[in-house]
Amino acid sequence: MSNNDFEATVRGRVIKFPVVDGLTPLELSVIVSQVEEKIKAIEEKTKVVDTSKLAIMAAFDFAVELDTLKQRSNTNLEADTKKLDEMVSCLEKSLEESKE
């Protein structure tokens, strides 16, 4: 195992994951646990036992969650930008009025 690998057990198999900059081994373990929990939940819900299929379904589920978070983040950014623009406009108006 190189310094760029993180080893964890998923579904009884030892797997080497690439290390992610900025994440500690504990954080990586939490992420692997989330993946394992997601696979288990999908397996229980669908009764699928094919590991490859479960992994793809889990990846899809995480991708849907990520897309939802991105959309929500973009919506929040747009709302924040609009609010800031309104505040700047009000401040500019107040400054102009105070000069008069």
Image: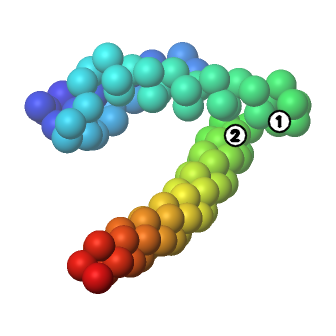
**Looking at this view, is 47 or 58 the one in front?**
58
For residue 54, the mark is 2
Residue type (three-letter) at the residue carrying disc 1: Val
Tell me the crowding category of disc 1: few under 14, some 14 to 19, or many 20 or more residues within 10 angstroms, Cα based: few
Tell me where residue 24 appears, x and y as whole percent: 24, 24
Q: Is 2 on the left-hand or right-hand side of 19? A: left
Secondary structure beneath dot 1 equals: loop
Instruction: Identify the residue shown where x is 25% and y is 40%.
Output: 20
Residue at label 1? 48
Secondary structure beneath dot 2 equals: helix
Q: In this view, does 36 lie above or below 58?
A: above
Instruction: Identify the residue shown where x is 66% and y is 31%.
Output: 38
Residue type (three-letter) at the residue carrying disc 2: Leu
Tell me the crowding category of disc 2: few under 14, some 14 to 19, or many 20 or more residues within 10 angstroms, Cα based: many
Q: Is 69 on the left-hand or right-hand side of 1? A: right
Q: In this view, does 27 lie above or below 23?
A: above
Tell me where residue 100 appears, x and y as whole percent: 29, 82
Instruction: Identify the residue shown where x is 77% and y is 33%.
Output: 42
